Amino acid sequence: MVMLTQFALQYKVIVPLAGTHVLLDGVLFPLFTVVTALVAGSGYIINDIFDYQADKLNKPEKCYIPEFITTKQAWIYFFILVLAGFIIAAYIAVTTQTIFYLGLYPLSVILLYLYSARFKSTILAGNILVSLFIACVTGVVFLAQSLYPGQDRTTAHILTELCALIMTLSFLLNLIREIVKDLEDIEGDSATGLKTIATGMPAQRIKIWLNALIICTLILVIVWLWHSAMASGFMVRVYFLIFITAPLILMIQKIKAARIKRDYGKISQLSKLIMLAGILSIFIITAQL
């Protein structure tokens, strides 16, 4: 889903607006998305290495350590992905003369490691960290383009507004889903001594926090639809009302009624659909520009 977002931003927003003035041109952008996939893949592996005990209880059908590969093999795959990603990232940095920003690569890998090794077992800190990471993976596409010299003000303004909107929505929706997943996985996390917001706080109190986050997301969408010139088109407003706002209101109702693991699983799936709708909104917004 992250790669889909990056492709949508690059080829539906940046390329049409910037024309030939694109930093990640030609093969560089596909390579950039490969780096993203390798970082994400290494993140999944390191998370599964540290979390396989809880995964046996929470999602045994998806647990592959140590049933299919050993922990040692998982570490080897982790380092292979990290090394491959760094080599490609270094090539992109040298080609675009942005070598200074190569430091973002090891920083992202370190943060993913710290998330799995330490912050995931802390109340809310891990949820916030991984949500920020997802938002920044989206924003890094805009960052790359902002480094291109001589960009006109109109293009820069549109890219900045879209970047702020998409990154904020991405952060809020991912944070909501992360907290819902903690509620879904409370049984396995409690059994293995993992400290999460779900194991350290009453469910009713967590629901209040979730509703507050959803209301913040709704306010953001409504304010943007009301004030932004990019949202002045009829189709943009209808799309956001039907596929973003309405499902968020439905989520509030489902959270109120949720009691068991299956309920939270359905809410998690609903949040994924809203996130997908957010990605597809890029096509609707750019069609009105």
Image (cartoon, helix red, strand yellow):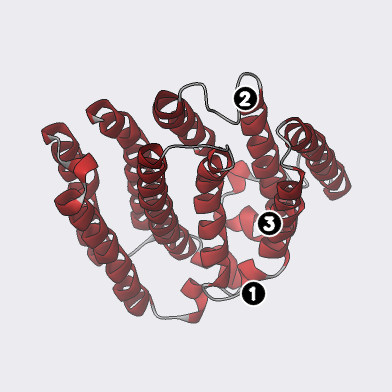
Closer to us: mark 2 or mark 1?
2
Residue 4 x, y percent position in the rendering: 48, 31
Q: CA distance from mark 3 to mark 2?
A: 22 Å
Check residue 116 in the rendering and tell me which mark sits there, or answer none.
none
- The residue drawn where x is 69% and y is 53% is 108
Closer to us: mark 3 or mark 1?
3
Check residue 112 in the rendering and tell me which mark sits there, or answer none.
3
Residue at the top extreme?
26
Label 2: which residue? Answer: 30
Q: Secondary structure at mark 2?
A: helix
Residue 133 x, y percent position in the rendering: 57, 55
In the image: residue 186, left or right of residue 35 = left
For the C terminus, the image quarter is top left
Residue 264 x, y percent position in the rendering: 37, 57
Q: Is residue 157 above or below residue 280?
A: below
Residue 177 x, y percent position in the rendering: 42, 56
Asked if labels 1 and 2 touch by Cβ distance under 8 angstroms, the answer is no
Q: Earlier in the sequence, mark 3 or mark 1?
A: 3
Q: Is residue 224 above or below residue 202?
A: above
Q: Earlier in the sequence, mark 2 or mark 1?
A: 2
Label 1: which residue? Answer: 193
Rendering quarter of residue 243: top left
